[in-house]
């Protein structure tokens, strides 16, 4: 068996550092699959991006270990490398963050050693990547209520409390809900009004919750699933909207669902956006584009956990059993 080269990039500060006790087991899994493994620990938030850009094309596989932000940074590095060389190696993901939205959407195991096994035995699957301005993202761009929570919450609080940190900070934000008057275009279909939230996503989970209004989706169809929530008239209507977010039940008067390849949002004032849970800047005019099949992910048993190349959701019974087994 010929030896292949792998970069294993590790964010040592991600989540609760669950990889630490499994590092030898994970590297051994890769080695036994025929990979020469170069372990690289990140030193800063953008370190993975730069390292992938610098040396990614010299390797057969890149694996990133960390949270949603680490995955986002790795994908950004791959996109920069792709612009330079025209092609990039596939990407494996070992989720070790506090939320792990994208990993849950793809049924990637939260046990590092199992995730490593899924990578070495898995299949290469193309997935869409988003772009907001000059920023790439892998699963969500959003603005409005709760979005500032993910980047305003201290990392150490996220690591200690997980989803509880978002709940604590989110409860604070409800005291003064900020809304935005805007015009949004979804492949030319236009809506206007005052909105408290908007998300453009390619994931089944956002912020630890099932994506609002999701019926069926594909990670590989060239389209985003979009949710925009209008400003409620009173606290009772706001409560109905928040219940809808938690229970995934529609409130037709206030929640707008769209699918689109390109989303344009024009505000009366600048609107702060996040991508993959990280602050992305303030935009008076924002354009979000879907880059179809831009990155290849290595995923586990697609016949068991659902194939992102199709528009079918993972059957609830299968997903439930898989999550319980982790």
Image (spheres, helix red, strand yellow):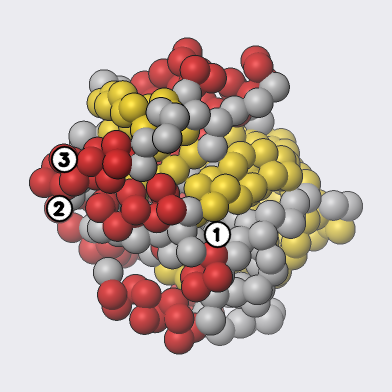
Decide if residue 66 is in sight here. no
Q: What is the crowding at mark 3: few (fewer than 14 residues within 10 Å), some, or many (at least 20)?
A: few
Indicate the quadrant containing the C terminus: top left, top right, bottom left or bottom right.
bottom left
Q: Nearer the viewer, mark 1 or mark 2?
A: 1
Q: Residue at x 37, y 36 (%)?
A: 34
Q: Nearer the viewer, residue 277 or 144?
A: 277
Residue found at the very far left of the displayed protein: 21
Q: Nearer the viewer, residue 11 or 182?
A: 11
Whether 207 is drawn above or below 10: the answer is below
In percent of width and height, residue 95 lies at 34, 50
Q: Do callouts 3 and 1 mark residues in contact (Cβ within 8 Å)?
A: no
Image location (x, y in percent) of residue 93: 41, 45
Name the spot of residue 76 as percent of width and height, x first. Answer: 53, 30
At mark 1, the secondary structure is: loop
Q: How many other residues sit within 10 Å of disc 2, few (<14), some (14-19) or many (≥20)? A: few
Question: Mark 3 and mark 1: span between their CA atoms?
Answer: 31 Å
Q: Nearer the viewer, mark 3 or mark 1?
A: 3
Q: Residue under circle 3? A: 24
Q: Residue at x 50, y 48 (%)?
A: 298
Give neighbour class at mark 1: few <14, some 14-19, many 20+ (Cα, 10 Å): many
As drawn, 50 above or below 25: above
Which residue was labeled with disc 1? Answer: 203
In this view, the residue farthest toward the front is 1
Kindly identify which numbered label has been placed on residue 16. Answer: none
From the viewer's perspective, is residue 284 above or below residue 214? above
Q: Is residue 25 left or right of residue 110?
A: left
Residue highlighted by disc 2? 160
């Amino acid at each position: 068996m010929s030896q292949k080269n792998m970069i294993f990039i590790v964010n040592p500060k991600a989540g609760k550092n669950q990889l630490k006790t499994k590092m030898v087991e994970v590297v051994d899994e890769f080695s036994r699959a025929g990979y020469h493994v170069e372990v690289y620990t990140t030193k800063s938030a953008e370190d993975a991006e730069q390292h992938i850009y610098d040396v990614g094309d010299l390797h057969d596989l890149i694996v990133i270990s960390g949270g949603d932000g680490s995955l986002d940074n790795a994908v950004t590095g791959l996109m920069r490398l792709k612009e330079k060389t025209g092609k990039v190696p596939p990407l494996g993901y070992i989720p070790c963050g506090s939320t792990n939205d994208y990993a849950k959407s793809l049924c990637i195991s939260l046990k590092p050693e199992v995730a490593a096994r899924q990578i070495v035995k898995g299949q290469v699957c193309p997935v869409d990547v988003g772009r907001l301005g000059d920023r790439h993202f892998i699963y969500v761009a959003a603005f409005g209520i709760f979005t500032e929570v993910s980047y305003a919450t201290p990392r150490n609080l996220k690591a200690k409390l997980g989803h509880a940190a978002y709940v604590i900070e989110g409860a604070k934000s409800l005291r003064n809900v900020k809304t935005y008057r805007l015009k949004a275009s979804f492949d030319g279909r236009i809506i206007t009004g005052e909105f408290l939230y908007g998300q453009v996503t390619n994931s089944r989970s956002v912020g630890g919750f099932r994506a609002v209004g999701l019926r069926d989706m594909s990670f590989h169809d060239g389209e985003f699933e979009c949710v925009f929530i209008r400003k409620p008239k009173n606290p009772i209507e706001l409560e109905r909207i928040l219940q809808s977010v938690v229970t995934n039940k529609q409130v037709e008067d206030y929640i707008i669902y769209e699918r689109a390849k390109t989303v344009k949002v024009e505000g009366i004032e600048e609107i702060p956006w996040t991508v993959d849970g990280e602050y992305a800047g303030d935009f008076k005019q924002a354009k979000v584009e879907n880059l179809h099949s831009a990155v290849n992910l290595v995923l586990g048993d697609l016949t068991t956990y659902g194939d992102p190349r199709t528009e079918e959701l993972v059957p609830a019974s299968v997903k439930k059993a898989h999550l319980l087994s982790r």
